[in-house]
Image: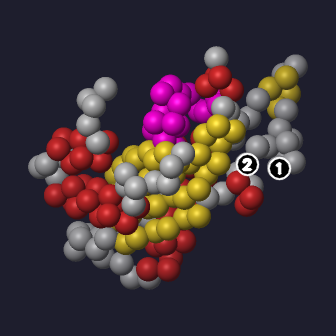
Amino acid sequence: RAKADPIDYRIGLLGEHPRQVALLKKLKEVSGWGKAKPGRHQGVAIHESFGSLVGEVVEITLKGKQLTLHKLTAVVDCGNVVNSDTVKAQIMGGSLMGLSAALGEAVTFKDGKVVQGNFDTYPILRFSQAPAVEVHILESGAAMGGVGEPGTPPAAPALANAIARASGKRLYTLPLDLASLES
């Protein structure tokens, strides 16, 4: 609605928060923001919890209700880092978990019973559906934060923002109902 670049708009709103601004600038740089291939669309979201900041850009193709996840780029500022491989693995796993929840994870009931009795009936993101994930660490010198959970929350809104850019329609409930895009 602001008719502004989504990352630049957030930077303008967060001017008094240097860690968030630095995170968004790094995310814009490493994600190739605004430089997606023709037909691809990007969405962005940031999140703060457990003393850490995470920003994610999701790049997709959307044809009708057929969604392809191409890439998720994450930048994490968790303060001082002891083991960068652990940080990257935690953010990668969390972001994929967030995408999975956004795209279909749901427990439903029929006749008072749970329909999804095991993973064969529970719609979790499969390897063949997962995007390439790239994680960048931004060391700010802040106190050490957590990395177990902060990668999960920004994935769904980043994906929803990419879908909105691709379709012109906003989806507000999880899991995201891609079938509603055709109506």
Residue visible at 32% across and 64% down in the picture: 29
Discs 2, 1 touching: Cβ within 8 Å: yes
What is the C-alpha distance between the residues marked 2 and 1? Answer: 7 Å
Q: Quadrant of residue 23?
A: bottom left
Residue visible at 49% across and 45% down in the picture: 41
| Residue 152 visible in the picture | no
Q: Please tell me the numbered disc located at residue 149.
A: none
Disc 1 marks which residue? Answer: 119
Q: Is residue 104 left or right of residue 1?
A: right
Q: Residue furthest bottom?
A: 83
Disc 2 marks which residue? Answer: 124
Q: Position of residue 80 (x, y in %)?
A: 30, 76
What is the span of residues highlighted in magenta in the rendered image? 157-178
Residue visible at 66% across and 57% down in the picture: 130
Q: Is residue 15 left or right of residue 7?
A: left
Pick the quarter of the image with the C terminus.
top right
